[in-house]
Amino acid sequence: MRTAGRRWGAALATMGVTVAMLAASAGAAVAAAPAAPSMYATPTAVTTSTISVRFLRSPAPDRVCKPDIGYEVLGGTFADWRDVGGFPNAPCDDPDPGYKFNGLAAGTVYTFSVRAYRITDGVKEYSGASQMTATTTGTSPPAPGAGAPDAPSMYATPTAATTSTISVRFLRSPAPDRVCKPDIGYEVLGGTFTTWRDVGGFPNAPCDDPDPGYKFSGLAVNTSYVLSIRAYRIANGVKEYSAVSSGTFVTKGVNPPTLSATPIAVTTTSLSIRFVRSGAPDLVCKPDIGYEVLGGSSASWVDVGGFPNAPCTDPDIGYKFTGLAPATTYTVSIRAYRITNGVKEYSPTRSLDYTTAGGGSGTPTGSVNPAAMSPTPTARTTSSISIRFVRSAAPDLVCKPDIGYEVLGGTFTDWRDVGGFPNAPCTDPDIGYKFGGLAAGSVYTLSIRAYRTTNGVKEYSAVSSIAAATLPPVA
């Protein structure tokens, strides 16, 4: 019994030693964990895609590098702890090394963490974690389904216009910074585009340029166009559009001359025509504008210059085709040109058929020649358009007591009799009429026709028409 008691006592003594060793080992394990590093409250550098942090090394008090201590970081693109080692490239006596988190989203808030570790018997023993919160620069990209962008704002006047192009400028979407955005593009409409055309995000313009531009090409001379732009953002593969911004603009360049419907003089061998000069609204001579004629004895275009011998203020000048055959019908044509960089830019051509004396059908008794309307208005406001036309009844083009005129368009949905213009000088060959009460920035087709009353019945001429736009509304 004593022997058994001695053995049991020895066993208890051995067990006590083992428990003491385990306790000592546990105490050593706890002591092996390093002190926590201390992350600074603010980052050392921030961009749209990176945030650089700085922290005090573990352990205190010396805060120098230790060969047995490393670090792990969490946050940004790291959804789990990432081992970044002991920062061996930083000076060992640098107490506060740094780390850069990359691949971040612009304008986004992140929480970053750092902790130290010491490896004991192949097992990492961790310190507590130190955290900080920081935000990347820039604007946060929209979440899917974030909605349509703000509308761009087109300027009321073009930055440039030629005979065939109009360059517009607009404020980018979205306010307030008006800089380029990788998720926002633009579409334009008008000119040669009868449906919306995607023109992208204007990547070639400086990103901080708030008002880039776009050039509409392939346009007609002296023609009014409504041009539009809208922004879009793609969400889940679907374009979400802003409101539309539009403006009404007119191409520049060479206006066509307006050829009179009948010659001013006819012989058996010649035809003298009359036309309203190019270059509305004033219709005076221009040093850079000349004319070419075709027809009669000329099988190709003949440059006849700018008619310098005619009074510069004479709006409707003439040209004589000679060497013609009697009683013969000829198609005669005229066009204006402007020389730009040594190249002639031509207006549209105006043509009519005339017959020399000595036979031919002539003008039937009782009929009336059409009035010839100038291709461009003489004046435009936001609510009115003024036209000018060559009177009916060539060759003299003076007022006639038996000839009147009717107009159509603007607020007139049917022909309106405006009489024979008795208040205009009777010898004035090209008189005018103002269409009033119009809407700003709108295109109208305006028409005129002459009539002669015979036996109480009006006999009408052919119709002369133009399309013209009122000025856009004042911003």
Image (tube, rainbow, N blue to C red):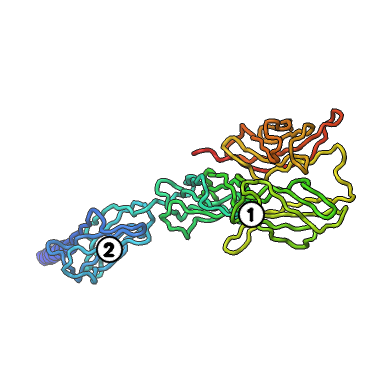
- Say if residue 22 shows up in the picture: no
Marking on residue 140: none
Choose top left, top right, bottom left or bottom right for residue 388: top right
Q: For this view, does 262 lie left or right of residue 204?
A: right
Q: Position of residue 355 (x, y in %)?
A: 84, 51
Q: Quadrant of the N terminus?
A: bottom left
Q: Earlier in the sequence, mark 2 or mark 1?
A: 2
Q: For this view, does 349 lie left or right of residue 176?
A: right
Q: Position of residue 395 (x, y in %)?
A: 78, 44
- Give the class, few, some or many, for how many residues have Cα within 10 Å of label 1's Cα (few <14, many ≥20): few
Q: Position of residue 147 (x, y in %)?
A: 49, 45
Q: Which residue is mark 1?
A: 308
Q: Secondary structure at mark 1?
A: loop
Q: Position of residue 305 (x, y in %)?
A: 66, 58
In the foreground, 39 or 307: 307
Choose top left, top right, bottom left or bottom right for residue 136: bottom left
